Amino acid sequence: MHILWREWSPRAFAQAEAEQKPVLLSLVTAWSDECAVMERTTYAHPEVASLIDARFVPVRVDADRRPDLSDRYSLGGWPTTKIISLLADELSKSMDVEAFAHEKENEFLNAIAEIG
């Protein structure tokens, strides 16, 4: 199973509102080795992908193409994963996911399970 990433768009946020789910925002760059590792390991993990698709509307943003979103949501590096609650239009919780890359899928899974 793979995560069905959406683009940052009104359509993605309308889906989140209609389904009453928070948005899981993944900020990545094409040149970051850590982003590639996160994609190959944590996001490719079947339980992680299943949980994300079930409890969130996953949105992927290329930080180089959307520096405005990178400036607003980045934790100062990539990859960054943020959970956005539409109820308050504010960030409900953030995670520095660099700590979850490199074979720590279970820690990431536990963290997002508590939120979603």
Image (spheres, rainbow, N blue to C red):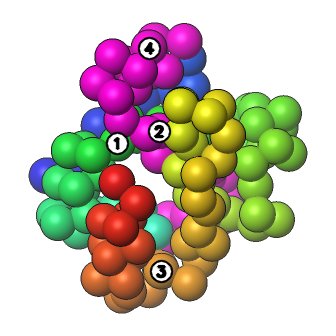
Please tell me which residue lies in front, 10 or 91.
91
Marks 3 and 2: which is nearer the front?
Answer: 2
CB atoms of marks 2 and 1 within 8 Å = yes
Could you say which disc has been placed on residue 100 in the image? Answer: 3
Mark toward the viewer: 1 or 3: 1
Disc 3 residue type (three-letter): Phe
Question: Is residue 72 something one can see in this rendering?
Answer: yes
Mark 1 burial class by Cα count in 10 Å: few <14, some 14-19, many 20+: many
Say which mark, if any, is on residue 14: 4
The quarter of the rendered structure image containing the C terminus is bottom left
Residues under labels 2 and 1: Cα distance?
Answer: 5 Å
Q: Earlier in the sequence, mark 2 or mark 1?
A: 2
| Residue 53 quadrant | top left
Which callout, 2 or 4, points at the residue further toward the start of the chain?
A: 4
Residue 19, x across and y down, in percent: 29, 24
Report the span colored magenta. Answer: 10-37
Residue 112 placement, left or right of 3: right
Left or right placement of residue 109 versus residue 73 in this view: left
Q: Which residue is label 2 attached to? A: 23
Q: Residue at x 54, y 31 (%)?
A: 86
